[in-house]
Structure formats: structure tokens, C-alpha cells
Image (cartoon, rainbow, N blue to C red):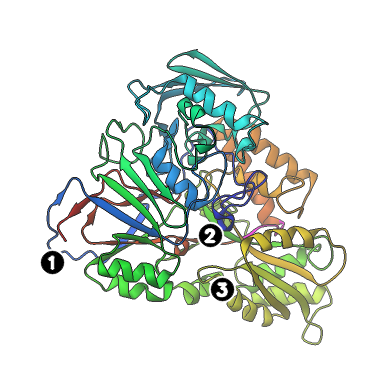
Amino acid sequence: MLLQALFKVKELAQCSLFKLIFTLLLLTACTSDRSTQNATNSDSNTATPAAKTGGTLIWARYGDADSLDPHRTTTTLSWQIFDQLYDTLLAFNDKGEIVPNLAKSWKISKDGKEATFVLNQGISCHDGTPFDANDVKYTAERALDDKNPSVTKGAWGPIAAVDVVNPQTVRFQFKSPFGAFVSFMADPFASMVCDSNKALGKQFGVSKAIGTGPWKLVSWTKGNEIVLAKHDKYKKFGRPVQNQGAPYLDRLIVRQIPEAQARLAGLQTGEVQLVVNPPLDDLDSVRNDDNLQMHVAQNTGQNFFFEFTISRPPFNDIRARQAVAYAVDVDSALQTAFGEGLVQREKCPISRGVAGNDQEFCSKYGYEHNPERAKQLLAEMGYGANKPLEVILMTSTGDNREKMVQIFQSQLAQVGINAKIETMDIGTLNARVKQENQKKTGISTFDMMDWAWFDPDILYQLWHSPGAYSGYQSKELDALLQKTRTTVDQGKRKQAVNEAMAYLLKNAVHIPLYTPGSLWVYATRREVQGFKIGPFNRPVFNDVKLSAS
């Protein structure tokens, strides 16, 4: 939760105002060959009519974008649209590895203070103007301009200058090394904006937008729908698709339907062809319908975890934090709350799909379910059957997380921890956690929080002093996190990330719980062929064709 010292991205529920900045050259993101989408109910006995080019796909979502300007917003609902409109210098392939895109090559200087990109030729903006190094310079300087209050400014790092070497070459100069810059160049928040947008003034991102992406903006009726048309001159360079040119569809319409049941009904009747987040309680109606297919986003970069108020007892004592970690049976809770296939157990402070995630490594430093050990630690602190530990467990609304904390509440009670549950929207939770960390008295709190990002730099945003919420801080941890940010050598940075994760786990600062595919379940009608969910929950439509229904 999306974003973060700069933005808490991805819906405040997934990111938060810091969610930014991150990885380094060639970071390979830790997943196996498992696909980034998990499609169910394919019926080998049912022949699907041949697909054809052209046509319109209607995608129903629960809300609307708030801006199409990548410097003005960090919400998922927005960036999933401008990911269609714009492109990035680099891209993530299906394994989460960084590959060339608008830039065909890049080079980082030995001291980490220069990053040079050489662009592909023949790239066309939606208005027909050629895309070149001047557009890159315009984009970066716009994002960094103090007169243009950009929510992504911090994501670009300590840039000192952006120089156009020639029309196909641009060089970034940094005041100090910034290991997360290269991966940020593959993220939608680093979308390249054609400099012809300057002439649009205040219309840019509201009613007009010019990019190089596979889709161009036709219209945006706020609160209703966004209409996109294929970019006829689009060329595929690094996106994880097979189609080398313009999308096969003529139009993509993104419609707002807030009610989950209404979205599912529209899918079942054929009013829409794609929905996100059908009701979790009704997923069997998708799985068992031969006309529908379900897709679960896997490598979302999102991580649910426990964090603790340490400004006052008892969680300023490591034993109290460890007692919570030992008391909860995460695997059992996940099975009860979500069933099979919707979530993955997470053992690292950075999520599956993010470079550096290593379940085996993190298991060495985390805590397995051990209620007897939890009771022992609580007894050492003076708590027991006649004197339970009274705390508040906070979380935000959404999917089945409320059911999760209720299960945790029951497990905690079995070891002598009475946890009162408080549920609120994510914005309120963010403010409340910070407020609690500034109080020296009162009943102590801990919370089940979620953040998402594609780089280990998320740890810096969360835990480097003063941190996202003014929570746990130490000079030792600050030094470890600073090293993860300024190290540009791939192998050395991985080692630095491991050291930081080990510290967070051993000291029970950040207790990982799960990675939620449950938050990003998509369903399509059977006539939709070629739809996929790219790394970090990026719906991809370049390969989509529609068959006769």
C-alpha cells in the first residue's frame, strides 16, 4: 500500500504516499515459471470459435481514474489506464526482469551517478510527432519541477540534470547513486509523456493526453467511462506481448460499475467482456460457467504484514512482538479466509515477484506458529491467564481481510492476548497508525497493513527514519536501508537487501503474512482471447482478439 514517502500508491490501499522509487539494473524478480495469470475453467472439450481482429472490448471496474497525468496520481485505477496510454523507457518481462523498451539500451556509470539511455527509432506519439530524447527530458523535468507539484517527484531520485546528448540519447546525472532508478524506468509512474502535451495546458490528463502507448485517448466521461482507440502506429519493443504492432481490437472502453454483483451480472449477460473483482463469495459461479474464465494476478508486488506501535509498552519490548508472531497460524487463517488459489503465504518483507524476494532465506529469520513459545514470552513479561495482554488490532476494509483479523483475534486469545479489532478505510488507517506511534500512553496497537511496489526500496520508504508512519527506528536499520538504496551493483545490492530483511524479521519489526491475488481477480467472457495480467498487476490488451460469441 500501493505508495509513500512520496506516495502510497496503488490505491491508498495498495500503495500510500511513499510507494515509489525502485530497483536497479537487471533485477530478476524471484518467481518461478508460474504464469503471471492463473486462468481457470478452460474446457478442452469446448471449441472456441476463431478470433478476429477489430471490435470493442468493455472492461468494468469498481471505480474511475482520478487523473491521466502520471505526475498527479498514484492510484491503481489511474495508472492502469495511463499504462495503456503511455510507455516507459524500460519494461518488465513476464519474470519481472528489466528489459529494453522505448530505450534499446542503457548504461550506468561505475560511480552510479550517470544513467544513459539510447532510444529506439521510429517511435510515434499519438499526435504523429516523433518521440525522441527531448520528450524524455520534458517528462523528467516536469516530474521534478517544484512549480509542478508532482506526487512522483521522489521516485526519480536525486537527479541533478537531464541532458539530451543527441535525438536518440539522453543522460541522467545524479547527486548521489540511486540503485532503484533503473527499475523505476519500467514502472507506469515513469511513463514518458510527449512534449506536445505542453500545449494542452490544463486539459492534459483531464480531457486530453498524448503518449506513445498502444491506446490513445478518445474521451473520458468522469464517473462513467473512458474510451480508448488503438494507436495505429504503435510498435512493440519491450512489453510482454506477442503482437508486434497496434492492438488487434479497435476500441477499449473502461466502464465504472461500483457494485461487484452488477459487474458480475454484466459479464454473465455479455454487456461487458471483462471485469475486475467479481464478488469473492461468488467466484464459484465464475469457475463453473463455461462461458467465463477467471484470472488471478500473481506477481502483484503487494504484501500484507503486521507492524507494531513501539512508542509505549508492550510492543516496545521485542518479546511482545515475537509473542504475536508465534501466536498466529497464518497458513490456517489464509485457508479459512480465502480457500485455495487466491493468496500466497509470504515470508519476506518484500513481496513475491519483487527482486530479492527469497522465501527460503526469509524462513531462516521469521517465526513459525508456536503458541507455547508465545505463552512463555508473555509470562516473562508478567502476562498470563489472570492478566491477559490487552491490545488493539487495526486493519483496513476490503476483500476478506476482516475475516483474517477475526481469525487472528481468536488465535491470539488462545495464548493470552485480547485483541480488540478496529476496521477503517485505508486513508484513516494510515493516519491512525502514525498518530498511535506518536502517543506515549494508552492501550497499545498493532495493525495489518498492506503496501505494494516492485522494488526492495519499499523497505526504505517504510522503515528508514522517520519511516512512513514514524514507527520503529534504529541507527543500525537506517544504515542497512541506506546501503540498499545507494548500491548499484546487482549482487551487492541483493546482499544489502538480505541484511535489511534479516534485521526486520529477527527484531519482529515487520511480520510478513501474505501476498493477495484476492485483491486482483479478473474474469473474462470466453470470446475474449489473448488477455493476460502482466507483472505487478498490469492488464495487457495488445494480444486480445474477440471470437464470435
On screen, 451 above or below 499?
below
Residue nearer the viewer, 112 or 68: 68
Q: Give the residue displayed 43% in from the left and 42% down from the top.
A: 83
Report which residue position mark 1 lands on.
45
- Of badges 2 and 1, nearer the viewer stands 1
Report which residue position mark 2 lands on.
346
Q: Is residue 477 left or right of residue 44?
A: right
Q: CA distance from mark 3 to mark 2?
A: 15 Å
Q: Quadrant of residue 104?
A: top left
Residue type highlighted by circle 3: Met
Q: Which part of the image, by quadrant, shows the C terminus?
A: bottom left
Q: CA distance from mark 3 to mark 1?
A: 38 Å
Q: Give the residue displayed 67% in from the left and 26% down from the top.
A: 176
Report which residue position mark 3 lands on.
404
Of mark 3 and mark 1, the one earlier in the sequence is 1
Magenta: main secondary structure: loop
Q: Range of the magenta residues?
A: 507-511
